[in-house]
Image (spheres, rainbow, N blue to C red):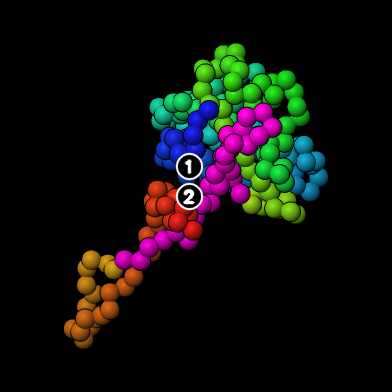
Amino acid sequence: MIEKDEAIELLEPHLPTIDKVVRDAWAGWMASSHPSNWTKRGRANFMWEEINTKAKQEFASGDAIKPMSINNSCLYMLDKLAFRFKKLNENGLTCNYPTQASLDFHAQSEPLPGIPEVARLEVGYLLNKIQTKIEEVVISYRESDSVEWSIKLSEYLSASNVVSMEQSNEHINESGTERKSSLVKVKATVKEAKSSEERK
């Protein structure tokens, strides 16, 4: 098992990219001609292909996360953990038919062929009720049917987590009098956003 705080520390630099590839894939789906005539299964397949294509492209430029293709699935290795992308159902669980491969993935105590013994996580996307947009992107650690912990990326990447600060330079207007220093909004760091959420 991997503790939540340890996983967040490893994933923290990559959370914006993880969120981006999921949302960009959804934007591609909505911009296509498919939503009006494809099935939910077709949509899930489209999203899986798009997400993994984009993720491989994004992570190719760095050494931290290494994509792996195992048994027609894509895993992303990062130190003590590996993750894969999946769609979530309304209960926050991944939409998997309970194949033996799926059961083995969630059985954290059992090693998988060809995969190092690391904690196995899932990055899931949850759609809104009318399935027109992504409601949330969630990273979770699951043991069999039990979700041991999960994090919502919006809690770490929300644009509402801003602080106001005065600009260091003073502005002088045409009459030579000092204008009030304007305020700028600066995104808080992921760690600051995390601390803010924990205090709530």
The structure residue drawn at horizontal position 72% and vertical position 46%, both measured from the top left corner, is 90
Residue 55 in the magenta stretch? The answer is: no
Q: Residue 6: give x, y in percent of width and height.
A: 44, 35
Spatial distance from mark 2 to mark 1, Cα to Cα? Answer: 8 Å
State the SS at label 2.
Answer: helix
Relative vertical location of residue 175 with respect to residue 140 in this rendering, above or below = below
State the SS at label 1.
Answer: helix
The structure residue drawn at horizontal position 66% and vertical position 46%, both measured from the top left corner, is 126
Q: Tell which circle, 2 or 1, labels the residue nearer the N-terminal end.
A: 1
Three-letter amino acid code at the position of disc 1: Leu
Q: Nearer the viewer, residue 91 or 53?
A: 91
Q: Is residue 199 visible?
A: yes
Relative vertical location of residue 157 with respect to residue 67 in this rendering, above or below = below
Three-letter amino acid code at the position of disc 2: Tyr
Residue 158 in the magenta stretch? The answer is: yes
Q: Residue 35: give x, y in percent of width and height.
A: 75, 47
Q: Which residues are magenta?
A: 136-165
Query: Which mark is on residue 15?
Result: 1
The structure residue drawn at horizontal position 42% and vertical position 48%, both measured from the top left corner, is 190
Q: Residue 98: give x, y in percent of width and height.
A: 75, 27
Query: Which mark is on residue 93?
Result: none
The structure residue drawn at horizontal position 46% and vertical position 52%, both measured from the top left corner, is 198
Residue 101, by quadrant, is top right
For mark 2, what is the residue?
156
Q: Is residue 97 left or right of residue 87?
A: right
